[in-house]
Image (cartoon, rainbow, N blue to C red):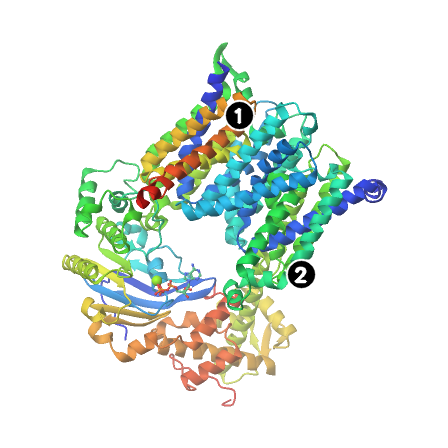
Amino acid sequence: MELIIDFFFKDPVVRWVLMAVILMCASAAIVGCFTFLRKRALVGDAISHAILPGICLAFIIAQTKNPMVLMLGAFGSGWLGLITIDFITNRTKLKTDAALGLVLSVFYGFGILLLTTIQNSGNASQSGLDKFLFGNAAAMMQSDAITFGLFSLVLIILIFILFNPLKLVTFDRNFAISRGIPVKRLELLLSVLTVFAIAIGIQAVGVVLMAALLITPASAARFWTHDLKWMIFLAAAFAVISGIMGTFISYTLPKMPTGPWIVTILSTIAIISIIFGFKKGILSKVRLRRLNKKKILRENILKCLYHLGEKAGNFDKFWSTWEILEKREMNKAQLKSGLKQLESRNLVILKGNAAKFSELGKEEGRRVTKIHRLWEIYLTKYMKMAPDHVHNDAEAMEHLITPEIEKDLEVHLKFPLIDPHDSPVPYKDLK
Amino acid sequence: MISHVDNPVLELHNLTVTYENKPAVWNVDYTIPEGNLIGIVGPNGSGKTTMLKAVMGLEKPSSGYVKVFGNDLDKVRDKVAYVPQRGSVDWDFPTSVYDAVLMGRYTKQNLFKRTSKRDREITNDCIKKVQLENFSKRQISQLSGGQQQRVFIARALAQEAELYLLDEPFAGVDAATENAIISLLQEMKAEGKTIMVVHHDLQTAPKYFDWLVMMNTRLIASGKISDVFNQELLNQTYGGRLNILTQVGELLKQTSHPIREKK
Amino acid sequence: MDAFWIILTGSLVATCCALLGCFLLLRKMTMVGDAISHAVLPGIVLAYLVTASRASFPMLVGAAIFGVITTILIELLSKKGKLQEDAAIGVSFTWLFSIGVILISVFAGQVDLDQDCVLYGEIAYVPLDTLYIGGNNLGPEPVWLLAINLLIIIVFILIGYKGLVVTSFDPILATSLGISTVFWHYSLMSLVSLTTVFSFESVGAIMVVAFLIGPPAVAYLLTEDLKTMLFLSVIFGIGAALGGYFLAVAIDASIAGAMASVIGVEFIFAFIFNPRNGILKRKKLAA
Ligand SMILES: Nc1ncnc2c1ncn2[C@@H]1O[C@H](COP(=O)(O)OP(=O)(O)OP(=O)(O)O)[C@@H](O)[C@H]1O
Ligand SMILES: [Mg+2]
């Protein structure tokens, strides 16, 4: 606890560093949302590796570690990498993936070559250039922190100003063109911003893991929302949380590299999002399936009661579970649970081991039976299926068809009275 | 109008294939007689390709089944050859026409063996049959679209199958090549092979085919061309998408509702 | 003698990677190769951790399993999780890689590994790692491991050539012929993982990618025949190993970095001189 208080409040340098990390992570995550949605996730990876030789060259030429100079070098070689990727895919038969891999590994290799020459030349001021490999935000100097923080802030503000046109370009390029929006220029700007964000972000997580700072927050956010504004907000929030935690860990345990910790925390958030996120998440599908299953069970019982009533000519009679099971094969425990659900919805009345329709239940039973029979007619008439093939299909569709489609079916089939198995179609007013 | 035959080469039984729970092929049920040239027609997106893929086991049906020569496909794979719709491979792949056609001779059994002399002979024969013998050493990207199509037909021929499924073999092919291919198919028919062809040109359909399958997500008709090639059935096939079916399909996708009740 | 061992090691890495890389390239899966090379890191660290200092052959094979896990993870995220594939690749390998780096930091004292080794390997130390059996000096151990690995790859390609080619060129045909695309996919990925793990000491986890992609890409531009492509990629791989070594010695830099740079130069040449649409060809056409 004391540690946490120390971390946040004691050291003014740490406060600046923390501020910078928050802004750097947020800007990378925000730009990353666009990269992600434009399906260029791995381009980000290639560019971040391509930045390394630029940093080294800038250092060799200028002999300084001034962040502005290094940033310039980083931006230059990142941009060159981007152009090279486009050039290779357009001018050779190599596909995008190979172009990405080639640029990524050759630029990075060249960067390592330069880095090791610098190190081996015994230049005293070189120490620390290799922090660009894994990033070491926690050890940033105050002046650097301010510079990077400001850059990130500019980036974020730019995106907010241009939010609407950028959104249009990302989601509906053709429409944007038709509206006379300068799509080419905006895309160029987006690329510039991406390279920029990467050049800044590697301070925090390093060239090797920079891709994660771009892609992972967006991937995680995608599972919680479909709205771009929310997606950007969530992505930034995830990145900021990870940034703070990663910096904290490497502040308290200086041996720990900042970048890998930030990325590990981010990835954990992403995995959790994938598992628990709604709308697109896996769990939500499982839940939907379970809800569907329950609904099907309830409606099947209602239909079964309706059939029993039809046969007996009496819909207000109590039927024992035993009689229901004889009419329709199902698991006894399931039937019990289904009847409970129906009772709590006021669709059946239970008495011991027997059940009967409530008014509401009778109406539901009639509706399901009617849809089943209508669908059977539809299948034989319009899908040309043999009458002995249609039952299974209708078993499923009776639970799905909405009142609107039910109406369409009635009109389309011209209010038929008899289904292919000679059972009557139970209309409401005919009752 | 759906005619069924005894001892069919191919039987689709209530076949439904879905993408993301939305049916692309819905309850299609037909049988195909042996030794015929069969056309498959239907508008774009009506599930023709999907149906052929399901026959080849490339898409899993969500209900129903396919029988080929009365068997599951796995038992009779070497009797069925499939030519996919164009553009399904990377033409820059470093392979020659000869090597591409030779792949038709690969089977599970000979995959680890050396290419036999017979395989090589058959490959050369098939290349001759589609009149590509002068191109057999060429890399496949250096062929015209029509020639590329013929490479794939040659490859299917090399499989020496009994049942051939061709997905739009005439797309982007000039009239001369189309004629050459159709007479080749007719020769194969004369040898007792069954050939199913996805076709878009209704003008030539009655000339080419003995039997016609008409579909639009669901099956509209399947029968002798003289029985089914009429205005009413064509209208049903091409006359707009069925409103109710489309609605229910969308609903299935949104709700992830099972298309068949699981017991 | 040291130079000989270093060049031999580099050539073995280059040959293994070139042969497998050709198929990765043709399957448009080079970025999956990239992902695997990063993602085996935690496996490697664990292998070193369990065996205290030098990991043994079985341990390294175990580490290679992490590569296969990555491919499964990517597939899971993209198919079941509905994440687009490039994002799935990016998320999974950065995750595993960062765990690997953290493990190295946590067990810094116990593992004979450091971050430099991860980033660009330590091929220069390979000759020090001598293998003794019954008192006989048999040369550096990594050379032996790589030689065994190369042997496995060559046998795999010789026996599985048809299967590899047909599943790479036309998976639809392969499936319809009853040939399992899944089997060949995972066999290839297992070998890529194995190669990454064995190459790790010499060129580092990241630089393997240069060898996996570079020489095959160069060869791909120069020929239109697969067998020639395999052959050329090996030649260019070994060429890069040789050239890289001498370059590194000349300017006193990382050997692996120099090798990757030479690959870049090779690619520029291939681009200029390639027969199909290289600049020379254009000039000729214009003339
Ligand atoms: N892989 C897929 N994922 C999702 N939907 C798909 C997929 N493949 C096809 N579909 C959809 O399934 C339907 C049927 O497609 P299919 O390719 O079978 O049509 P088709 O009759 O072959 O059309 P065409 O004449 O254009 O070739 C279309 O609505 C299509 O959008
Ligand atoms: Mg089609």
Measured as percent of width and height from the top left, residue B45 is found at: 38, 66
Q: Read off the residue under disc 1.
A: C255
Residue A97 locus on image (x, y percent):
47, 45
A99 or B64: nearer the viewer: A99
Number of marks in the image?
2
Tag 2 residue = A161
For residue C216, what is the image quadrant? top left
Instruction: Farthest residue to the bottom: give it.
Output: A430
Q: Residues within 10 Å of mark 1 (few under 14, many from 20)?
A: many
Quadrant for ligand 2 reads bottom left
Q: Are marks 1 and 2 in contact (CB under 8 Å)?
A: no
Instruction: Say what amino acid the circle numbered 1 marks.
Output: Ile
The vertical placement of B164 against A263, above or below, is below
Residue visible at 55% across and 79% down in the picture:
A364
Residue B66 is left or right of residue A368, and the answer is: left
> In this picture, is C220 found above or below A316?
above
Q: Residue shown at 44%/25% (left/top)?
A: C11
Q: Secondary structure at mark 2?
A: helix
Question: Disc 2 residue type?
Answer: Ile
Image check: C286 left or right of A146? left
Which SS class for mark 1? helix
Q: Chain of mark 1?
A: C
Whole-percent x, y for residue C150 in the image? 42, 27
Chain ID of residue with mark 2 = A
Asked if ligand 1 lies within 8 A of label 1, the reply is no
Image quadrant occupied by the N terminus of chain A = top right
Q: Which mark is residue C103?
A: none
Asked if labels 1 and 2 share a chain, the reply is no
Residue A160 seen anywhere in this rendered image of the structure: yes
Q: Is residue A99 left or right of residue A7?
A: left
Residue placed most toward the observer, A352 or B139: B139
